[in-house]
Amino acid sequence: MNITRRALALLALGTALVAPGLSQAAEKTIAFMRGGPDPYYQFGMNAAQAAADKLGVKLITYSANNDPTQELANVQDAITKGVDGILIYAVSLSSEKAAIAQAKKAGVPIFFQYGYDESILADSAGIMQIDLFNFGQPVGEAIGKLLPEGEYATITGKLGRGDAEAFAQSFKNGMVKSGSKAVSVADLAADWDRQKAMDAASQILTAHPNVKAIYAANDDMAVGVAIAIDRAGKSGEILIGGNNGAPYGVELIEKGQMTLTGSNPPSIASVHALRLLLGVIDGSVKPGQFYYAPTQLITKDNLGDAIPWDAQPEMVAKWLEEPLPQGAAPPVPPAN
Amino acid sequence: MSSPAATAAASASRKPGGLRTLDIGRYTLLIVLLLIVVITAIGNPRFLSVNNLMNILFQVSALGIVASGQTILLIAGGLDLSVGAALSVAGLATALTIMSTGSVTLGILAGVVAGTVVGAINGMLVATNRATPFIITLGTMTFLQGVAILMSGGSPINGTGALFNVFGLGDFLGVPWPVYAMIVSILAMFLILRFTTLGRYAFAIGGNEEAARLSGIPVRRIKIALYALSGLFVGVAGVILTGILDSGLPSMGTGYELRAIAAVVIGGTPLIGGRGSVIGTLGGVLLLGLVSNSMNLLGVGANFQSAVLGLIITAAVLLQKKS
């Protein structure tokens, strides 16, 4: 009995002496949340994990499987776990608002990748994304320079959220800006899906045999377009512009089956987003700012400099040495 | 076979007006198909080009194979919501096997086996539980979606070599190989439904499961066999779609379950089972493919396409019901 009491007292004393030291050395814990199983999120998460390992940060990962309810549950669970911050690719604007309300109540900074809305910026740790309204423009300008005249078509993603519509429109704006006289003969939607894009491209080639360029609003669809062109025996005759700079898109450019892609690599963006969130947590970065995610136009001429989605640890280490992105004015929708 | 079973099957297919309704339904579908063809041909003469017609058949080939398998399930009063996710799993099994072994033959085998095994497991779950096939296969669908993501790491598995050369680019006498695969699948299902004991049992179980059981039909075993058979078709479709896309994708089967069921129902097979035909299913598959193709060729705006497709499908089904 006495021995037990003494042992307990010693244990309590030891814990009291060691605990402060433990808490001082405790690593930061960040919850990384994906909206769904999309490869883009996966690669972003992988790069953030590599950066977290180098920075001595613990990263806990969650996926909402495109379910806003699950996303909110994930946010609540992370807060309950006592995370220091949340880095999130949100499912939708409504779920963003719910997530931000929960995080704000708990005093946990939450940084968004994509899903910018004016109403949530001030309460967020920050938001990083591309300029959705002009994402397709550099691709349009580049294709326009290669196609001074003739016919072109666009295949975009799932309509209804605004991004698919904006990508196709900004591509067309780029074509006009390049000075090209080429005319748009078809605008189809293929829901960001490879097979649907292949079918759509086949139909474009049937209805408009003289089409000389096709824009696919993501590289997954560009693969489908390339297959359709291949099947039609027109490989090398039709320019293909894609978006995202995904590994399979870069591979198509290497093979000469795609002309170029406007890349928005999730890897470097996630690394910078994590750094900014950590800056907000330690007070060195002002919260509530908007940041543009890095973008790059990839052609066969600069393949060697393409920022990979699948970043190796040494590349992540290099990005950690770069200056932090600066806050900027958020993009505004075009007047039309 | 035993006469009680045959009697049960016969009584199921002799429901009042059953045959008549099916025939009229088939004519309705044919009329709708012809209307679409005529309107589109007037709007864009290229619609009737051999190249475009082959494109349509090529585009619906995987759906046609999946829907063929789903036909016998619906006839038997069953349902499999997991066919889309199973298609992804089968396709990924094919792509991953080709990637790791370099053998296209092993890849094909892996895809077909994966589809069949998934189907058999669904069949066992449905046959041995009181829960409806809808709920059970909804569960397996969710599970298989997760399996597909785990298998692929969330990314496409690219490069299928000879499989792409055959199914993606290859043809015989101007007809793409996937179209042959669809024709063979439909023919095989037609023969199974028309001339085999399994087909007769499917009609009997769908017509009246209790009567079928009392007449000596081993309902549980037949259900497992039917789901496995449907899974086999899904596996074949997975292999072919992987070849067409030159890749296995975790999302490649997304939406196939609903489109396959829609094609079967449009083709005149009721959700309650007991009657139906795979030729009708072919009509349903063609309708789905034609509508999409004709809207694109007629230049119908992307914003309208979903609404128009929904209207045409609903109209086709309602016209059949009225008749």
Image: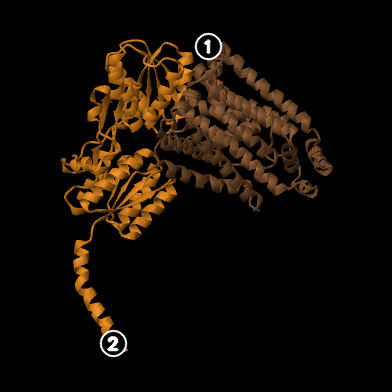
Q: Is residue A83 visible?
A: yes
Mark pair 1, 2: CA separation? 95 Å
- Examine the rendered structure and indicate whether residue A284 appears above or below residue A248: below
Residue assigned mark 1: B46
The chain displayed orange equals A
Which colour is chain B painted?
brown
Residue assigned mark 2: A3
Q: Point out residue B65 in the picture as x, y percentages from the top left corner.
A: 59, 31
Q: Which mark is residue A292?
A: none
The front one of A214 and B85 is: B85
- Examine the rendered structure and indicate whether residue B165 appears above or below residue A234: below
Q: Point out residue B12 in the picture as x, y percentages from the top left corner.
A: 78, 39
Q: Chain of mark 2?
A: A
Q: Chain of mark 1?
A: B
Q: State the quadrant of the C terminus of chain B.
A: top right
User: Residue placed at 81% from the left, 35% from the top?
Assistant: B16
User: Residue placed at 39% from the left, 32% from the top?
Assistant: A162
User: Residue placed at 63% from the left, 42% from the top?
Assistant: B227
